[in-house]
Structures are given as structure tokens and as C-alpha cells.
Image (cartoon, rainbow, N blue to C red):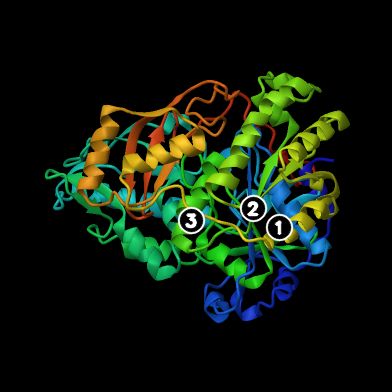
Amino acid sequence: MNDIEIAKKIKLEKIEKITEKLGIDNDYIEPYGNYKAKVNLNLYNKIKNKKDGKLVLVTSINPTPLGEGKTTVSIGLADGLSKIGEMAILALREPSLGPVFGIKGGATGGGYSQVAPMEDINLHFTGDLHAITTANNLLAAMIDNHIFHGNELGFKTVTWKRCVDLNDRQLRKVETGLSGEKKMVSRYDGFDISVASEIMAVFCLSTDLMDLKRRLGNIIVGYNKESKPITARDLKAEGSLAVLLKDALNPNIVQTLEQTPALIHGGPFANIAHGCNSIIATKMALKLADYTITEAGFGADLGAEKFLNIKCRKANIKPDVVVCVATLKALKYHGGAEKEDVQKENISLLEKGLANLLKHVDNLKNKFGLNVIVAINKFSTDTEDEIEFLKKKMKELNIEVCLVESWEKGGKGAEELARSVVRLSKKENNFKFIYDGNETIKEKIKKVSKQIYGAEDVLYSELADESIKKIECLNYGKLPICIAKTQYSFSDDEKKLVGDEKFSIHVEDVILRAGAEFIVIITGKIMTMPGLPKVPAAETIGLDNNQDIVGIF
């Protein structure tokens, strides 16, 4: 059976039963049907003095195009903790429609390790992404309306883009204002995918509604002739934007197929944004359960680095344990295997690809000072010889490793990992940031590039140099950095998979996100609007004769 068939055959609990497990009074929930609900932000004020539970971050090695199954392992781990008698909750990101209809598929796990209702979560859910898209585009409309009516603020350049939550490469660069109306000002514009919008980052990094409004007002949308920034607050837009996002800011609660609670809220990509679910949902989860399982997008060089250097810094939290997910196919992929050969047994390629895993483990353990477990996400094509080889190698290197079979067995397939997490969470760690906030932008980029990626040097375009000088002149240089980079390798070149080549990081542009309170570093050929593959998933998604949704994976 495929994922959607498995999800449909399992009977879910009414959402009130799930919130009851967490001790949430019905006054604090707003059901969206039988199996999903919004949790009112006021709940946090009621429980904020409770002791935090343990925080477990799930990350991975650099993935193949179809991912490493971080969400499947995260869900399996939460269910596994429930199986061994622990109170666990998930705090995950919302899926974007871009991957759902593209190549990567949905983001609700797989097999018997899923959050549900999977079709709802992968599609419109409770409308959060639509609210973010609408807020982004309202701000764009207000900018052009202001210019049309006289440009009192003196826009010389507009830096704010429109967005849509789909992969549509045709929209990367467009020309607007071509209607020919009197006073209409045409200009070049472009679209980002919604999950790369600064409003998504603001949404996920805000601590409450008033903090959201403050950050929205701080968004820089353009510059005047004197190169001074023009903000959303200058346009008197922050109130309307906050109103559009008010209900969306309440976290969403659903359940796993084994009825473990899950907060799913916010969803920035990690290759072009900061890759973490909302601070609000994570901090609420920490008060509601003994173990909060959260994940950060793509490999640890992207999502985990940003979780640790941006989110932990902003939210004043730190993980007690990090789970680094690896698959044998990805290890062989990074060992030089062709895509069609990653499912074939090949110990030599597996061994060669270990360099990728070991670099991630070293970063997490020795650079960030955290307790780390490697989770082998088992696939049906994996052989016993390959699994035993990997286990033996990890043991020789004194790296804790667990085999996870949650796709096939649900929580039962992650009990070993759950017990290891409980044991390791009781050990102290020496968590530290990679860079200090007071360092220059280039010093921060250099530290992440050299220490986390293993780059020899960082090279800057003329545009990037100019942008850095401008940002530091505006006194924003102390903000954290958010590096936009390919997810497929440590370098900024997605084809350098093996990791045995020397490389430099190429910084093409640097963009200030004053509302999100970080600086985006554009490297290599990364795009903030992805494109669809030759055969997108959109071609196979549809309705069957019973009018049930099929094709989502």
C-alpha cells in the first residue's frame, strides 16, 4: 500500500481526544472539522511557568532529491517514545504546495509513520500558507499603489517581491504595470515561492501577536534616492498585515497514525530560508510534553545550522539531543553512485559516502557541542550486509547509531531510537553558537563556510560586497546570517556530491531581512523560486471513482 492508502485505513481520534491527552481545555481550541484544530495563543500564558520538557532536533545528511525521511523518523520517534511510556509531542513545519505538486512530495511522513489527516495537511490545511501569501501580496499591492498615487516616500528601488506557493520558474522575473493607464509606472519585478517570503520568516520567528506586528512594520520594501530604507511601517501596512495573519499565528494541532499529538505550524524551506517551524509552536510544545520532537529542513549544514544559530538564539532554547538521519542510498549517492544504482548493494560506495555523514556528525558533536545519535532510516532495498557494515563503522568511531524501521512498523520500529534519546537526553551538552552576533557579516559567513561546510575560502561578487557595505552602514550588521545554498552538497555546487574536492563558497548577493532580523546570503546558483521537474507529481495527483484524493506521496 502507498502512504495515502495506509493513512485512510487507520481510524483517527477526534481532535478533542488528542488535546485532552495534553491537558488542553476545550476553551483553548478551535476545531477545523473532526481531526485538526487551532490552539489559541493564550494557552501559552496559562502554562508558561511549567518546566520545559526535553527538546530533540531531527536533521540529516545531505539528501537525495527525494529526501532522507527526516519527517518519517521524527514521527516514528515520537510514536516510539509514546510506546515506551513517555509523553511526547511533535513540532513540525507545514508542507508547501511547491514540493507536493513537484518532485519531493508531501511532508507528512510515510508508511505507518505519518501525521494525519495527510491530504488536508499537504494541501490547504487550515489556510496558514494562504494567509502568508495574501499578506505578502497585499504589501506588494500597497507599494505599487503608493507609487501610482505620487510616490510621496520617494521610492527609487523596490526590493519587495510578490509570491505564490507553487514552483513556477516563469515568474522569477516579470515586468509589471503594462496596462498603459495614466500615471502607471511599469517596472521589473519577480516572484518568490511563499515559503521563501520574509513574511513566512517573520511569522515563524515571532513570539506573539504584537511581536509579529512589530516585525512586519520593520520589513524593508525599498530605498529612496538617498539610499535610505523604506519600511512597511512607512506605508502604514503593518496593521492590515497583522490582521491577515492573526488567526494563522495560532498553532495547528493534529495527530500521528498512532494518536501522538503534533503541532504543525509555519514552513520555510531551509535551502532558501531558515527551515524551522514556528517558535510559538516549539515553545508551546515544550510546556505540553516531556519530549518535543522537531526537525529542521534538508541536511544539517542547512536546517540544523539555521535552527541552532538563528532559532535557538532568538528563542533562547537548545536541543538536548540531535538525531542525524541517514539512508544507505544517500550514502552511496555521496559515494559517487549514479541515481539508478543507489538501491543496489555496494559496500565500497557506501564506505566512500560515509565522509558526508561523518562531517555532519563532527559539526553537530564538536562544533556545536551537542549529543548526537545517527538514525539509519531503513528501506526495503537495504541489505543486511550494508546495515551491519554501517553499524560496525559507527561503533569503531564511537558514534551512537540506531536502525529505524518506522515506515514499515510505526512507533514499534523506532523504540530503540526512543530509548537511546531518553538516555542521551539526560547527559549534559556543551552547546555553543558558531559565530558571535557582534562579528562582521563576512566573519560570520567565513565561520559557517569553513567550519560547517569545510570550504577553503569565500569569494564575493561585486554586488555582494556592495550589499554588505550598505547593510553595515545601516547598522544591521550584527544580525544572524541565513545562507541560501544547495541542499545536495556541502559546497554551493549541487554536483559536488562526493566531498573529496576542495571548494570555495561563492556569495552572489546579500539581502537584509530587517523584519525577520537576519541577513540572507545568496550563494551559487540558488533560486528563491523553484521550477517543476519534467514529470511533476501534479500529473499523477487526482480523484478516483469514489472522489477520494489519490497520488499524494
Q: Secondary structure at mark 2?
A: loop
Q: Position of residue 517 (x, y in %)?
A: 36, 54
Tell me which amino acid carries mark 3.
Answer: Lys
Q: Could you tell me if the residues under marks 1 and 2 are in contact, i.e. CB atoms within 8 Å?
A: yes
Is label 3 or label 1 in front? 1
Q: Which residue is mark 2?
A: 371
Is label 3 or label 2 in front? 2
The mark nearer the N terminus, 3 or 1, is: 3
The mark nearer the N terminus, 1 or 2, is: 2
The mark nearer the N terminus, 3 or 2, is: 3
Residue at image location 36% in from the left, 65% down from the top = 213
Tell me which amino acid carries mark 1.
Answer: Leu
Q: Which residue is mark 3?
A: 311
Q: Which residue is mark 1?
A: 424
**Viewer-nearest residue: 225 or 191:** 225
Q: Position of residue 158 (x, y in %)?
A: 25, 42
Q: Could you tell me if the residues under marks 3 and 2 are in contact, i.e. CB atoms within 8 Å?
A: no
Q: Is residue 298 visible?
A: no
| Quadrant that contains the N terminus | top right
- Binning the other alpha carbons within 10 Å of mark 1 as few (below 14), some (14 to 19) or many (20 upward) gives some
Tell me which amino acid carries mark 2.
Answer: Asn
Is residue 161 depicted above or below 261 in this figure?
A: above
